[in-house]
Image (cartoon, rainbow, N blue to C red):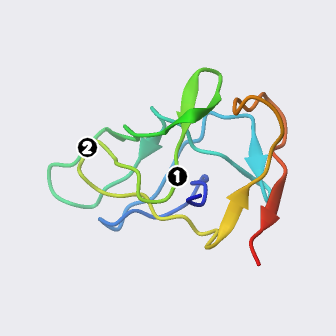
Amino acid sequence: MKPVIRLGDPTSHGGKVVSASSTTTMFGKAVALVGDSVTCPQQGHTNCVIVEGDPTWTVGGKGVALDGHAVSCGAKLISTLGSVMRGYEGSGTASSGTVSAAESV
């Protein structure tokens, strides 16, 4: 499983995630979802948003953004969590609150 993207995580264009609409947190930072805002320093790349999320892991009906997922400007998201994986029980849909996570060994 790819690591989760959180508020402040970088992109391949040198930008970063600047909004995370999820009330779900992982290791103290809000989890980013499809539609959340991303900065991009490349000329002409304005109003960038996350356009790709995991279809099987949603919060409020929006896919959770994972490492390598796309931004509207063409950048890829880069997780700062390294090899941390999601850990949850249930149907694959996270609800509001804190998602438990376990570090992979």
Q: Mark 2 or 1, which is nearer the eye?
A: 1
Residue drawn at point x = 81 percent, y = 44 percent:
88
Cα distance in 3D space between marks 2 and 1: 22 Å
Judging depth in this view, the residue of 44 and 95 nearest the camera is: 95
Question: What secondary structure is marked by label 2?
Answer: loop
Residue neighbourhood size for the residue with mark 1, other residues' Cα within 10 Å, grouped as few (<14), some (14–19), many (≥20): many
| Earlier sequence position, callout 2 versus callout 1 | 2
Residue neighbourhood size for the residue with mark 2, other residues' Cα within 10 Å, grouped as few (<14), some (14–19), many (≥20): few
Residue picked out by circle 2: 46
Question: What secondary structure is marked by label 1?
Answer: loop
Residue drawn at point x = 84 percent, y = 50 percent:
100
Q: Residue lying furthest bottom in this view?
A: 105
Q: Residue lying furthest left in this view?
A: 44
Q: On the image, which quarter does residue 95 sit in?
A: top right
Residue 66 is tagged as: 1
Residue 11 placed where, x, y %? 39, 62
Determine whether, in the image, residue 11 is placed left or right of residue 3. Answer: left
Residue 45 is tagged as: none
Quarter in which the C terminus is drawn = bottom right
Residue 41 placed where, x, y %? 28, 61
The residue type indicated by label 1 comes to: Leu
Q: On the image, which quarter does residue 60 sit in?
A: top right
Residue drawn at point x = 47 percent, y = 64 percent:
78
Q: How many labels does the image show?
A: 2
